[in-house]
Amino acid sequence: MEPILEIDGLTKIYAGGLKALDDVQLTIKRGEIFALLGPNGAGKTTLIGAVCGLVRTNGGTIKAFGQDLTKNWRSARAKIGLVPQELATDMFEEVGRFVAYSRGLFGLPSDPARIEEILRSLSLWDKRKEQIRALSGGMKRRVLIAKALAHEPDLLFLDEPTAGVDVELRRDMWKLIGAMRERGVTIILTTHYIEEAEEMADRVGVIRQGKILMVDDKAAMMARLGRTEAVISLVRPIAELPSSFADYPITLSDDGTELCYRGGDGSGKGKADVAAITKALTLAGIDYDGIDVHESSLEDIFVDLVEHSEGETA
Amino acid sequence: MIGFNVRSTWAIYTRELMRALRTAFQSILAPVLTTSLYFIVFGAAIGERMPDLGGVGYGAFIVPGLLLLTLLSESTSNASFGIYMPRFTGTIYELLSAPVGVAETLVGFVGAAATKSLILASIILLTATLFVDYSIAHPVLAIGYIMLVAASFSLFGFILGVWADSFEKLGIIPQLFLLPLTFLGGTFYSIDMLPKPWDTIALFNPIVYLVSGLRWTFYGTSDVNIWVSFGMTIGFLILCVGIIAYIFKTGWRLRD
């Protein structure tokens, strides 16, 4: 799939000396949902700001839609949308006018029907005449999304789109993001909710201290770094593991009452191993009365990656 | 890439004008009321007892100065608030990420601020007819000069709005510098009336040239040569445009 965004060697050092982006290399494919994960202060918002023209960079290049962003910023920006992390709104403005303004600002002709469609899709139509200050935090977030969609972007940045919103609204937003993908919009989102990335993303990138630690397909990343953990409780303690279990990554607890399996690759191999182990236990005449299986989530992988990199840099 | 996005400019311009309508009392009625009070006190009440200045009745003499007083303060504050508020609320992100450059931003924000000032100027001139008897010798030049001053100080206000990082700073320049300089710039008197050396010192006040220039378009007489006034105003406008171009080029106070 052709790239829609190519970032090469991007560096940003703030006035105080903080290196927010450190030689970032990143390519985003057209039509994908890309989740950028990282702890607070990792550089996610700075990276988005650099692409959207909010941040001056110290080095590197950004190509959007195949063209250098510094030279062709007008045509590129017209096709890029941004939902910022902060709830930045004009409190006294009416919802409908505020959204319609965004369309005009990005150089598109007035289109009330399109604005209505966007407002309805975000359940904002009934609020179109209300001042923004009268809305809840979640509704304000919807207004920002509506503004970002008003100029029909091909590439959309969602910086913590569901921060501070309730579960119901979060689910609604996931549906909306899915619908945008159906229309061919490329979406780059940052989030603290790893389940959000797990639910929606095609690919995942992990950033920490301004460096991209890893970029991979979500499924491939989970297959490569995922693990299965299973604890099998034995009815009677055993002194040692039978030799038939030598091929499995199993340990026996000190009191001999629990077998602990830690292996697999996130692709289902671990579950298959656990099934085979239970069959072997039965054949060996070893009774068990409980199995607790845990598949590692994207969150586990993310925490492992970040903690591992912290250990390396410490 | 060179270009000018007309729709974007129109969006900024109309939004800024709508903002003024939303705050009509503060933006339009308040300055008109204040200026009317000046006309009543200095024009109609005290002016009746003052001698003519250069063949012009005192009430009429102060019309250009009072008009300029409002033009300077309103152009500056409208434009400075126009760009400061998006910075303060964070909505500046949208402007910075939009396909608009310095030209669209300036025409949008500064054009709207200047338009508001011109609307105000028209209302004030109409209101003045209720209190004092005045005429305009060079109406076309007067309109042109008013537009030039409104544009120049709207640009100045824009710079102020980018520079300020607090509401206090936003008010410092208009209140502590612009207002005193305007009062001392010949709004209520001709600098010929000042004793030496104050008449010479007054020439270091740039507002003197603005008041004098506008007064010339009204009555054909002025404290300083009209072309000097015109040149000073054009020079100020060019300086402001240069500073704003620098701001956009470097992203000073706008981009991290």
Image (cartoon, grey):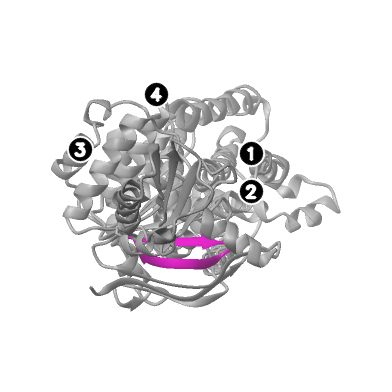
Instruction: Estimate the spatial distance between the alpha carbons at disc 1 and disc 4, rounded to whole Å.
Output: 24 Å
Q: Choose between B189 and B107: the one closer to the eye.
A: B107
Q: Which residue is mark 4?
A: A134
Q: Choose between B134 and A248: the one closer to the eye.
A: A248
Local secondary structure at mark 4 = helix
Q: Chain of mark 4?
A: A
Residue B10 placement (x, y as % from top left): 31, 52
Q: Is residue A213 magenta?
A: yes
Quadrant that contains the N terminus of chain B: bottom left
Which region is colored magenta? A203-217
Q: Is residue A123 visible?
A: yes
Identify whether B127 is placed above or below A143.
above
Local secondary structure at mark 1 = helix
Instruction: Estimate the spatial distance between the alpha carbons at disc 2 and disc 1, rounded to whole Å.
Output: 7 Å
Q: Which residue is mark 2?
A: B164
Q: Chain of mark 3?
A: A
Q: Chain of mark 2?
A: B
Residues tagged by mark 4 and mark 3 found on one chain of the structure: yes
Q: Tell which tag, 2 or 3, sits nearer the viewer.
A: 3
Q: Tell which tag, 1 or 4, sits nearer the viewer.
A: 4
Q: Tell which tag, 3 or 1, sits nearer the viewer.
A: 3
Local secondary structure at mark 2 = loop
Residue A121: which disc?
3
Q: Tell which tag, 2 or 4, sits nearer the viewer.
A: 4
Asked whether, in this view, residue A152 is left or right of residue B111, the answer is: left
Instruction: Estimate the spatial distance between the alpha carbons at disc 3 and disc 1, rounded to whole Å.
Output: 38 Å
Residues at circles 3 and 1 in contact by the CB criterion of under 8 Å:
no
